Amino acid sequence: MCRHLGWLGRDVAISTLVLDPPHSLRVQSYAPRRQKHGMMNADGWGVGFFDRATPRRWRSTTPLWGDVSFDSVAPALRSHCVVASVRSATIGMPIELSATAPFTDGRWLLAHNGVVDRAVLPATASAEPICDSTLLAALIFSRGLDALDEVILQLGADDPNARLNILAANGSRMLATTWGDTLSVLRRADGVVLASEPYDDDPNWQDIPDRHLVDVTPDGVTITALRGSR
């Protein structure tokens, strides 16, 4: 499994989301508190953020806790929209940069927390040799994020053992699904955080029920059950 985090709101230093909190993604890379599958997330990390309308990414195959260069630069990086992830590679999946979230189609940043049988995913020339998450991202991008709920429901039916927690953002909107693992939301005065698990003990964190879709825009947060799920 993995842990991921998203932010939509005012410009903030990326370090305040990913590194500084007491249970930040950096801490979750070696000591997650709510992870259901796996004990650590040491198989790489990625931070995507929007420079105005353009998505940028910084990814690595090394553990986040040991990346001194990112630690020194992250306080100077600011953005209104962030998608970050630490990775625990599924057995048999490669540990390489192209398999490390967030993935992008040039408009969206996307992370996958989970696993899905590659046999139920359509092959693509670019993603086929890599891993389940890259194939899944390619499928979601090809269908469009407005069809995210339909994609998740179909894959959940095709692979009953799939875990399909998705987090995606395009600079003005965040979308997330819960399907097999945890997700929480924190509504702050300056924006909204979505995270696999809370990065601190603020009592305002709200846990999202399983098999739900979360839609975050500047107008607020909408949480709906994925139709047809049980």
Image (spheres, helix red, strand yellow):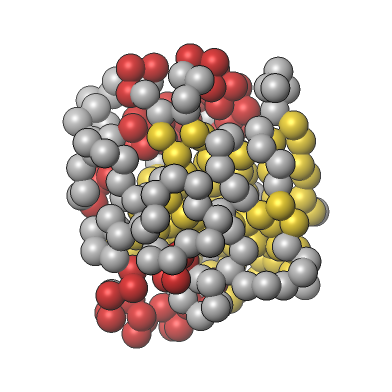
Q: Is residue 163 left or right of residue 174?
A: left
Where is 57 relative to 10, above or below?
Answer: above
Rendered image quadrant of residue 80: bottom right
Q: Quadrant of the image for the C terminus?
A: top right
Rendered image quadrant of residue 138: top left
Q: Number of labelled discs?
A: 0
Q: Is residue 217 visible?
A: no
**Residue appearing at x 58%, y 58% in the figure:** 197
Rendered image quadrant of residue 93: top left
Q: Is residue 62 left or right of residue 22?
A: left
**Residue appearing at x 56%, y 36% in the figure:** 180
Q: Is residue 125 visible?
A: yes
Residue 7 image position (x, y, % from top left): 60, 62
- Viewer-closest of 153 and 199: 199
Residue 94 image position (x, y, % from top left): 20, 42
**Residue appearing at x 44%, y 71% in the figure:** 27
Where is 212 relative to 100, above or below?
Answer: above
Q: Is residue 59 left or right of residue 11?
A: left
**Residue appearing at x 80%, y 54% in the figure:** 219
Q: Is residue 227 left or right of residue 169?
A: right
Residue 28 image position (x, y, % from top left): 45, 65
- Viewer-closest of 189 and 166: 166
Residue 54 image position (x, y, % from top left): 46, 57
